[in-house]
Amino acid sequence: MISYEKRIAWFNQARFGMFIHWGLYSLLGRGEWTMLVERIPPDEYAKLANQFNPAKFNADSWASLAKESGMKYMVLTARHHDGFCLYDSQVSDFTSVKTAAQKDFVAEYVKSCRKAGLKVGLYYSLMDWRFPGYFDRKKYPDSFKAMAKQLHGQVRELMTNYGKIDYLFYDGEWIPGVPRFRQTGSPEIAKLWRAKELNQMVRSLQPEIIINNRSGVDEDMDTPEQVVTASKTGRAWESCMTMGASCGWGYIKNNPTFKTTAQLIEYLVTSASSGGNYLLNIGPKPDGSVRKEEVTRLKEIGKWMKVNGESIYDSERPPAMTAQWLGGIIGYINTKGDNLYWHILRWPGKIASMPGIKNKVLSATIMATGQKVKIEQAKDGRLFLTGLPQEPPDKNDTVIKLKLNGKLAVSDCDGIPL
Ligand code: GLC
């Protein structure tokens, strides 16, 4: 098997990806959990498939939006908890190929990702709400078994029929009444889904693939949801997040609580500066088009990434305390080689000061304008950047690139070891 370092390398360089939640639930406009939350019986819910015939589906435009935003990979819900496949499955009739759309959306999506030079990720939910055995496996043991069999069959199809898949994002592994610990693995859950066998099969079909930690086995990376929480050094992680407040990954028609571009950039920066990735979600409309609230924000992030992307891609992870102290209240820092990037989100005006740098700072440049900044380094280790513009050169996050005379070295601040 390819070593962990080798197979995870592209992921750690990428730092920024697009999550796409799209399926029958998009028609309802209340998020992807509607079937369960509103207790819609499976056969009534299944009728939605007769209406799911998206006129504006265009995977190329999804991929070019991701690219324009500075993202390096995408993850599409090939099948969510409702069991509806956006691809051609031989082990289920509940698919977009066998119903109104008569289309294999996964095939088109994979093609578009590749064409755009993006890594290809597929999301697949282990659970399927249509099986009574999922909710009560003691009462309906055969139903649970059939669901697990479907899982193995469908993952095999996804890993066999679409060429190289770079990333498998499992979800929905939790089972009523069974303890779940995503950070350390959940042996009982893994056993019920036969996850070790499943992932072995995946790796034999896709030797370079990376697999997330949501099958009961910890595999390649952690996946904090809606929060940015770093894993221990050496372990890859990715924070996935909706643009709207809290729940609802699928299209929510009336959603007044979108995060601002500055907030989204802040999440991207905090992920990258703690050695993690940011997987930002869109929930396309039922017709396949992307709503303007999402497009606007992604394009604004893209503009910012064009100028400041080098501070995000392949960024390193300074020790947590260092990053906190050095960035200050006004922002965050991260490093790459001998460069230190100071992300200033809360612009201080003419002077910015940072404590505790031992290195000589050779130059300081505002990335948004190219302006060189005057450097003063006091004996006590404090660094002052002076003559800065009064107003923030970038209203979202002004990045100042500091060239150091070596790798970042810090002293302690007031006796607080960094
Ligand atoms: C949760 C939700 C699911 C969503 C996922 C994204 O697990 O159940 O709807 O797809 O988060 O990470």
Image (spheres, grey):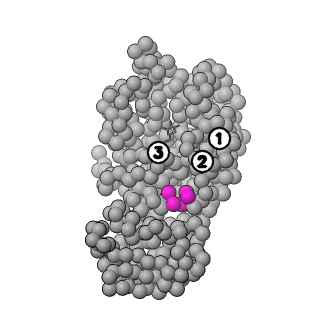
Residue 378 screen position, x and y as percent:
36, 85
Can you name the residue that lies furthest to the top here? Answer: 139
Q: Element at badge 2?
A: loop
State which quadrant residue 64 falls in: bottom right
State the residue in front, 137 or 207.
137
Name the residue that disc number 3 marks.
225
CB atoms of marks 2 and 3 within 8 Å: no
> What secondary structure predominates along the stretch shown in magenta?
helix
Residue 282 visible somewhere in the drawing: no
Q: Residue at x 62, y 51 (%)?
A: 258
Q: Which stretch appears magenta?
A: 263-267
Does the beta carbon of the residue at mark 3 sit less than 8 Å from ligand 1? yes
Whole-Å distance between the Cαs marked 3 and 1? Answer: 18 Å
Q: Which of marks 3 and 2 precedes in the sequence?
A: 3
Name the residue that disc number 1 marks.
252
Name the residue that disc number 2 marks.
244
Does the beta carbon of the residue at mark 1 sit less than 8 Å from ligand 1? no
Residue 176 visible somewhere in the drawing: yes
Q: Amino acid at mark 1?
A: Ile
Residue 331 screen position, x and y as percent:
47, 67
CB atoms of marks 2 and 1 within 8 Å: yes
Q: Which of marks 1 and 3 precedes in the sequence?
A: 3
